[in-house]
Image: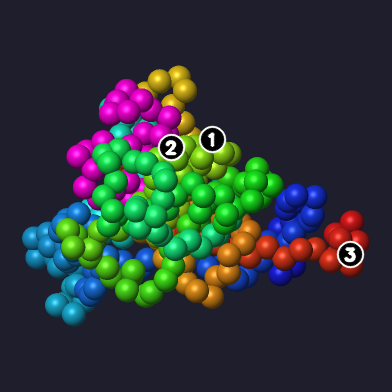
Amino acid sequence: MSKFNLITELMGKRYQVDIEHPHSIAIALNFDGEQPNHFGADTAKRQPLQAGSFIGDTTKGGSCNVDSIQLVPHCNGTHTESIHHISNQKVSVGAIFNQSLSIACVISIEPKLAEATNDSYFPTLQDADRVIDKAQLQAALNNETLQHIESLVVRCVPNHDVKKSYRYDDTNQPPFFTQEAMMWLADSPIKHLLVDFPSVDKMYDEGHLTNHHIYWNLEADSHQLTDTARCDRTITEMIFVPDDIADGIYCLNLQIPAFELDAAPSRPILYPLIECSETHSEQEQ
């Protein structure tokens, strides 16, 4: 089998998918150490299963290790959500992503203070809020690329390892998108939006989740699906994109367990794309 055995075409060029050099951009969830945390949720926990005389811990005399785990997908690490996050009707996250690979673009953006943008948000922006606005997205992602990708990976800079164990709270609120930025994304072909902060909306937004509604095309504050709702879209939050992953185009494998829930822990994997040389192209033919 060839090292580069997957071929894709993009913007008039042929690329080989380097499946031997995957990059996971999920935060490893350490049940016994530091974890990222959002919104004051309990930390993710594990404990050995106990059933009668059985204990699922080989260090305690058990025949094998069997853990019971407790976590909140939205708050305890990398997770992917479906429109069911804001809708009454059930749209299971594990059932909506049926493509093994999609073309993704990684971009890096430094959030700006709200006082430095002309964009808006609901509820009203506070000067100290940190936001990603429409102009920043347009500067980082040209229109030609935007029309050829299905997934967008947003890395905030500066990019520190502390994101892997950061506790977001009243005094450490994460950045979020402006309404105009999210409307621009909602009007694009993007189906899978991945960010390295815990919510595309402001942490304390009076429960409106304005950007979630815009992205999934639901009326503001509504929880009812309509014929125009974008049930095929996902949002993945709390990823971590290491600095050695350059901005650019990749293949994305968004791995989601078959959970009948609005959200589930997930493992996005990026595969580099290498432009086919003329020699490689001839060999493929």
Q: Alpha carbon of mark 3 to alpha carbon of mark 1: how far? A: 36 Å
| Residue beneath the point at 89% across and 67% down | 279
For the residues labelled 3 and 1, say whether their Cβ atoms are less than 8 Å apart. no
Label 3 amino acid? Glu
Q: Is residue 262 above or below residue 66?
A: above
- Where is residue 227? Give x, y as percent: 45, 19
Q: Which residues are magenta?
A: 198-224
Mark 3 lies on residue: 278
Which of the 4 quarters of the picture holds residue 19?
bottom right
Q: Which mark is residue 207?
A: none
Q: Where is the C terminus found, in terms of image quarters? A: bottom right
Residue 205 lies within the magenta run: yes
Query: Residue sitting at 37 percent across and 66 percent down?
Result: 27
- Residue 214 image-quadrant placement: top left
Q: In the rendering, which numbered label is found on residue 187? A: 1
The residues bearing labels 2 and 1 have C-alpha atoms spaced at a distance of 9 Å
Observer-nearest residue: 250 or 254? 250
Q: Residue at x 34, y 69 (%)?
A: 163
Q: Is residue 190 left or right of residue 218?
A: right
Q: Earlier in the sequence, mark 2 or mark 3?
A: 2
